[in-house]
Image: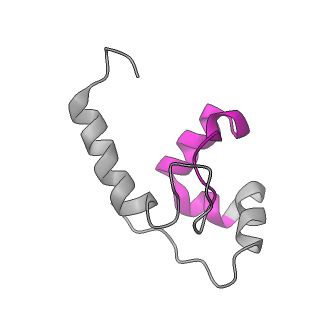
Amino acid sequence: MTANLDAAMADAGLKVREVKCASCHKITSEKLVGPGWKGVTQRRKPEWIMNFITNPDPMISKDPAVQAQLELLPGPYAQSKPI
C-alpha cells in the first residue's frame, strides 16, 4: 500500500467486499466458491478485474473464464447481490 491511500475509500471498498465478495472469495489463494484473490493481478488484466468488480452479473453470464470456473461448481450459482 502507498502513503497516498484514501482511508475512507479503502473502508468503503472493504464494506462492499464484505457484502458482495466475501461469501464466495477469500483473499488468500484458497478457493471458497470462487477462486481466491491471491495472485489475481498476475492471472487477469486490470481491465478484466475492474469489469468484474463493477459488472459482475454480465461477466458471470458471458465471460468464458468465469464460465469455466462455474463449470467446476457443484450446484447453481446465485447471482451477486446489488450494492
The colour scheme of the drawn protein is one colour
Query: Residue at image x 26%, y 43%?
Result: 12
Quarter of the N terminus within the rendering:
top left
Residue 5 on image: x %, y %: 31, 22
User: Where does the magenta region start and end?
Assistant: 35-61
Residue 57 on image: x %, y %: 55, 63
Judge whether 44 appears above or below 76 on screen. Answer: above
Pick whichever, 53 or 31, lies toward us. 31
Residue 30 falls left or right of residue 15: right
Query: Residue at image x 52%, y 73%?
Result: 79
* Rendered image quadrant of residue 6: top left
Quarter of the C terminus within the rendering:
bottom left
> Is residue 14 rendered magenta in the image?
no
Judge whether 24 appears above or below 78 on screen. Answer: above
Query: Residue at image x 56%, y 50%?
Result: 52
Residue extending furthest toward the top:
3
Judge whether 4 appears above or below 51 on screen. Answer: above
Residue 44 on image: x %, y %: 69, 39
Query: Residue at image x 29%, y 52%?
Result: 15
Residue 7 falls left or right of residue 16: left
Q: Main secondary structure of the magenta part?
A: helix
